Image (cartoon, rainbow, N blue to C red):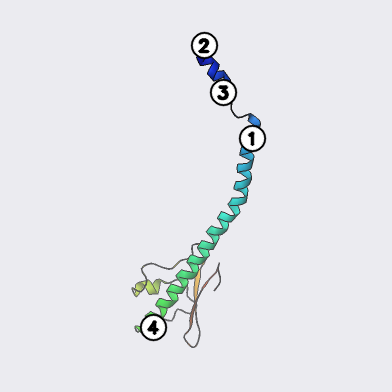
Amino acid sequence: MRFTRIIGNEKGFSLVELIVVIAIIAALSAIAMPNALNILSNSKRSTCVSGRATAVHHYYRYHVNGGTFNPHGTTGTQFLVDAKLLNVNTVCKSGGTLTWAIAPGGDATLTCSVHGN
């Protein structure tokens, strides 16, 4: 008898209270999701910029060490991998194509089709 009395006196959350909590969580998720997507996009851009800077640095090392290949207008960094200056090809995580531009003075630029310079 005492057991049923204790259970009968317990109070819980009403359906309305649960729906309000779920609505609040949904609203917070809707606000947080675009921020999370921006963080992902910014990290891909930063990775691309960093990878291109590293590849250009190794291009200069390639020429200091006697490399003669001029990659102007070509895509990719395979020639640096072949020269054992990079471990892997530099790639854009967003799927961009990397294109070399070599100025007459020898300044190198590696441009991404998605992120630009």
Mark number for residue 63?
4
Mark positioned earlier in the residue sequence (4 or 3): 3
Q: Nearer the viewer, residue 48 or 89?
A: 48
The C terminus lies in which quarter of the figure? bottom right
At a point 62% along the width and 38% down the height, the residue shown is 21
| Gap between marks 4 and 3 measured at Cα | 80 Å
Q: Amino acid at mark 1?
A: Ile
Q: Position of residue 9 (x, y in %)?
A: 57, 20
How many numbered marks, from 0 up?
Answer: 4
Q: Amino acid at mark 2?
A: Met
Q: Is residue 63 above or below residue 115?
A: below
Mark positioned earlier in the residue sequence (3 or 1): 3
Q: Residues within 10 Å of mark 1 (few under 14, many from 20)?
A: few
Q: Position of residue 112 (x, y in %)?
A: 52, 70
Residue annotated with mark 3:
10
Residue 108 appearing in the image: yes
Residue annotated with mark 2:
1
Mark positioned earlier in the residue sequence (4 or 1): 1
Q: Amino acid at mark 4?
A: His
At a point 48% along the width and 65% down the height, the residue shown is 47
